[in-house]
Amino acid sequence: MKALEGVKILDFTHVQSGPTCTQLLAWFGADVIKVERPGVGDATRKQLVDKPGADSLYFTMLNHNKRSLELNSKNETGKEVLTRLIKECDVLVENFAPGALDRMGFGWEQVQKINPRMIMASVKGFGPGKYENCKVYENVAQCAGGSASTTGWLGDRPMVTGAQIGDSGTGLHLALGIVTALFQREKSGRGQRVMAAMQDGVLNLCRVKLRDQQRLDAGPLKEYSQFGENIPFGEATPRAGNDSGGGQPGRILKCKGWEDDPNAYTYFITQAAVWEKICDVIGKPEWKTDPDYATPPARLPRLNEVFDTIEAWTMTKTKFEVMDTCNPLDIPVGPILSMKELAEDEGLRATGTVVEVDHPERGPYLTVGCPIKLSDSDVEVTRSPLLGEHSIEILRDVLGYSEADIERIGASGAVGDMKPQAAE
């Protein structure tokens, strides 16, 4: 039995933030019914297409384990079907522009009347306030949530991260909100609204930078490189390059082959507990007793020299040789792994973190699997649905429509072309 088996999700999401959320719920066994515009579907189906005639990787990698229903919610018969879906489902998830559901006639108050146990979950760009009606995309969320202002190099422009913390990060937050609301419903018997704002999600992931903002009141942030370089701190948490976000100084250092390989680097942390082992490894045993290097406070003004010395050693080793040397000594290091290396990693494939999926239009492709592992709920990643692939199946098996009703609905134009389920 899957963890969320029996839970029905009405998925009105598109692009990335909402589909990330509903895909995670689908991986855990929820029946996710993706509602799509007839003949068009999710906009990402045709964005960044790499194989003509097939859904894009953008779409397929965000919509596994779901069923697709084409539905025109502006059509009167479509509204009938949608009303019935709301009665049957447990959760409605959406990331429309503000007010879109109200204009459709299915705002929160109406949904509550149809199904008082319904949980309505929404992704928004901003929470209530002066920006709540603004359109937000991934990089806008990173900028408005504090990530960009604290990412990059001191003295240079702000920088966004390659991790999708605005879209996918908010989707993960929303999924937690949904399962929490489902748990509370078991006791209260009532549905409720769940909101996840992208700005809020990014800020939550930047909490250590908000921590540092408050620490500035007590003086300079000594673990930041600029302290050792005698560069004054301003009023806001600065950009810190590749400095560690924790109390233990760390940096990205060159490894053997860096001249030709853009990812021949390692992250190296000078953890206080293993400082003496670090000194032995890099050939500086005298630093163990030298008062200028023996203690963490003494090293802080000298971090550039310390890491330059460590880098002189790491440049004689590959990033994996650095791991082989340091890990047995409990020295925290980590290789900079490229997407190519991650895609080919046998360990990640063995755990289902990276999986290969076959698709009837595009053939086999690689995707990320479920990042969360449950001992009693295995995850099987199945391909994303074709547009409208399950329309008949959902009308018949979920909503209980007769064959005559299905023909009536099809003739009304409410559910697209009424394609039968595609053969694998």
Image (tube, rainbow, N blue to C red):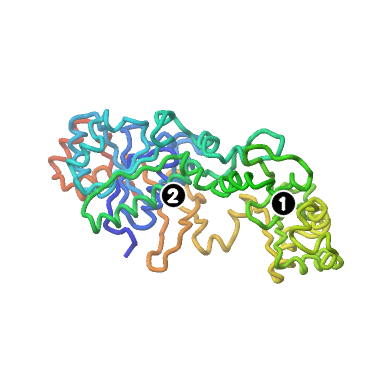
Judge the density around disc 2: few (<14), some (14-19), many (≥20) Cα neighbours within 10 Å.
many
Q: In the figure, is residue 369 to the left or right of 86?
A: right
Amino acid residing under circle 2: Leu
Residue at coordinates 59% horizontally, 44% vertically from top-left? 213
CA separation in Å, label 2 and label 1: 28 Å
Q: In the figure, is residue 315 to the left or right of 55?
A: right
Viewer can see residue 314:
yes
Label 2 or label 1, whichever comes before in sequence order: 2
Q: Is residue 371 above or below residue 67?
A: below
Question: How far from the left and from the top, in percent, is residue 269?
Answer: 70, 58
In the picture, the quarter occupied by the N terminus is: bottom left
Residue at coordinates 31% horizontally, 52% vertically from top-left? 181
Question: How far from the left and from the top, in percent, is residue 32?
Answer: 32, 49
Residue at coordinates 33% horizontally, 44% vertically from top-left? 121
Q: Nearer the viewer, residue 418 or 32?
A: 32
Task: Quickly name the residue at label 1.
Answer: 252
Q: Nearer the viewer, residue 252 or 376?
A: 252
Disc 2, SS: helix
Q: In the figure, is residue 330 to the left or right of 373?
A: right
Amino acid residing under circle 1: Ile
Q: In the figure, is residue 378 to the left or right of 7?
A: right
Residue at coordinates 52% horizontally, 44% vertically from top-left? 165
Question: How far from the left and from the top, in percent, is residue 191?
Answer: 25, 48
Task: Quickly name the residue at label 2.
Answer: 172
Q: Residue furthest bottom?
A: 328
